Structure formats: C-alpha cells, structure tokens
Amino acid sequence: MIDIWGADHHGYVKRMEAAVAALGHPGKLDLVIGQLVNLFRDGEAVRMSKRTGEMVTFEDLLDEVGGDAARYFFLRRSTDQPLDFDIGLAKEQSSENPVFYVQYAHARICSILRKATGADTADESVGVASIAATLIAEDAPLQLLETDAELSLMRKLAEFGEVVQATAEQLAPHKLTRYAEDLAATFHQFYTLCRVFDPENPELTAARLYAVDSTRQVLANVLTLVGVTAPERM
C-alpha cells in the first residue's frame, strides 16, 4: 500500500504505520512525503492564501497547461524536494520546456520513419508502429554503428531496464523523466552528427534506422509509464 502525504503530515507516519500493523499488515504501508509546490507566472510567485480565499486549484492548472505538462512537471522532481512550477514554461512550445522537448524527439523520429518509406506525411491514418514493422530490418548490421554519437545512443537505450527497476524499487518516478530528457538529448546529438539515410551505404542506413526506431520505442515506453502522450506529429 502506497500513500502520498504532504510535508505537514510527517508527524502522523508512525501512528499510521502502527495502525496498519494492528490491522494485521505490518510493513505493508509505504508513505511518500511530498514537499510544497510553488506556482510561478512570468517570474513572479503566485500568491495563495486560505485566509483570503486566493488560490489556484489543480483543476485550474490542468485547464491552463494541459494534462501532459502538469503530470510531467510534477514528476520531474523527487518528492523530497520542493517544486517550483513555472506555468509559462509548461505552456511554451520550445526546447526549454522539458515535456515538449521529449515529445518533440518522439515526433521527430516518427517523421524520419515516414520519410524513409516515402509515406504521405499528410495521411495521419498510417501509424508509425506499422511503418516500422515493415521498414526496420531485424537483422540490421548494428556492428556498423561505431561512432561516438551512435555508441552513446545505444548505451543510453541499454539503461532503460535499470532505470525502470530503480524507479519502482525507490518509488522515484523522477528517474523516468530525467532519463527521458537525457535520451532525447542523446538522440538529437546523434541526429545532428549522423546522416541516417546514406544512398551509397544501404547497410549503414538500415543499422541507423534500427537505432532510430529503438529510440522511438523507448521514448514511447517512458512517456506511457509516466502517463504522458507520445505524439507522432507536432
């Protein structure tokens, strides 16, 4: 059993654990203590007060920034750290916005795969997963991926399983968002330095497309785990 409490309820931890033990479930309760959330708009703190009735509800926040950004921003920080939530940044469509940055990496890969097949980019009925199923060679010669950028991408992809395990064991979803941002940055570096399509070297093209699609799949997996959409077009 996992429960999430605010920092001002820390004093109730021992008595709740004792109550659960008395009910016959000793050691079965995990209490995660979250810290305060501070909202910022245009660089200024949003002042709230129960006494005066000035407050921003979570529903208001969802209406303004959307579910993806709200969920992602709340999961970016460890629960033992206060969260400064920048409303303007959460709405921004730029690389400065971490959720946009990660989602854009996924959408960019989807665009690469569509172009690789010559698929009509205006036809949204064609899913990228089905494109990848026919495009990516299972026996792609991955030994040809030997540049620093290629190796860095493969190493980052290989970390995924360990990150998921650590996230579950430590009740630390911020490890997933941090990994997603690192993977997106590693992919962008790879894409900048490595030419995916090389007409004179079809084997290298096949290997790089394999790496590109693997990145798409892992990014989609991470975003799914944290409850954020993985758009194919942006």
Image (cartoon, rainbow, N blue to C red):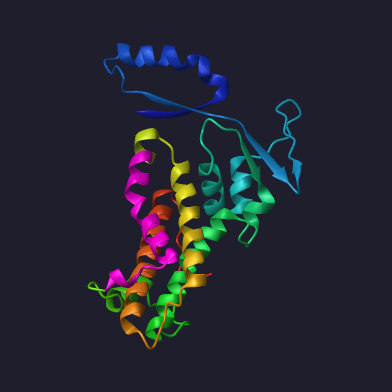
Q: Which x, y percent locates residue 110?
A: 43, 72
What's the residue at 52%, 53% (across, down)?
68
Q: Would residue 94 be found to the left or right of residue 198 on screen?
A: right
Image: magenta residue range: 141-166
Decide which of 204, 72 is in the foreground and name it. Answer: 204
In the rendered image, which quarter is residue 82 located in?
A: top right
Residue 19 drawn at (x, y percent): 37, 13
Q: Position of residue 104 (x, y in %)?
A: 52, 65
Whether residue 24 is visible to the viewer of this picture, yes or no, is yes
Residue ranking furthest to the front: 147
- Name the residue located 40 percent from the left edge and 66 percent from the top edge: 150
| Residue 158 in picture, x, y percent from top left | 34, 54
Q: Specify the principal SS of the magenta part.
A: helix
Quarter of the image where the N terminus is located: top left
Q: Can you say whether 209 is above or below 230 in the image?
A: below
159 part of magenta stretch: yes
Is residue 124 rendered to the left or right of residue 47?
left
- Left/right placement of residue 183 relative to residue 100 reads left
Q: Answer yes or no: is residue 233 visible.
A: no
| Displayed quadrant of residue 205 | bottom left
* Quarter of the image where one finds residue 57: top right
Quarter of the image for the C terminus: give it: bottom right
Q: Is 224 placed above or below 45 here?
A: below
Q: Residue at x 66, y 53 (%)?
A: 89
Q: Residue furthest bottom?
A: 200
